[in-house]
Image (tube, rainbow, N blue to C red):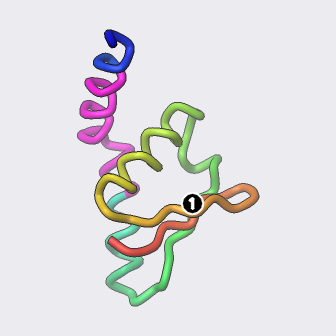
Amino acid sequence: MTAHNQAAISLDRFDQSLKMQQVLSVVKASKEMKNEDTRFSFEELGTSREAIFIITLLQIKGYVVDLGNDEIIVKGG
């Protein structure tokens, strides 16, 4: 259970990070431009851990995240 609690704390911290705020800003701007989806390459998302946190937090916030070959596709919100 401790590992789960640490992951939750890290996820909460990451939600407040500059990287997550940048992702949300891009998604918001894309939505305002009437785009159906927003695409991020895995390279843009950073490390594997950061990508997992970004995908998880986007899903928690109500976005649908589809995985492409080298990218994620974010819809909704």
Q: Residue furthest front?
A: 1
- Left or right of 58 on screen, residue 50: right
Which residue is found at the position 32% from the left and 71% from the top? 77
Magenta span has 12?
Answer: yes
Magenta span has 55?
Answer: no
Residue 53 position, x and y percent, is 43, 39
Q: Secondary structure at mark 1?
A: strand
Q: Residues within 10 Å of mark 1 (few under 14, many from 20)?
A: some
Which residue is found at the position 50% from the left and 77% from the top? 37
Q: Which residue is mark 1?
A: 40
Residue 2 position, x and y percent, is 32, 10
The amino acid type, in three-letter code, at marker 1 is Phe
Q: Residue furthest bottom?
A: 34
In this orientation, which residue lies closer to the viewer: 7 or 22? 7
- Give residue 64's quadrant in the image: bottom left
- Left or right of 30 on screen, residue 67: right
Above or below: residue 71 compared with residue 57: below
In this orientation, which residue lies closer to the viewer: 41 or 73? 73
Quarter of the picture holding the N terminus: top left
Identify the main secondary structure in magenta: helix
Start and end of the magenta stretch?
A: 7-23
Residue 70 position, x and y percent, is 72, 55
Above or below: residue 17 compared with residue 70: above
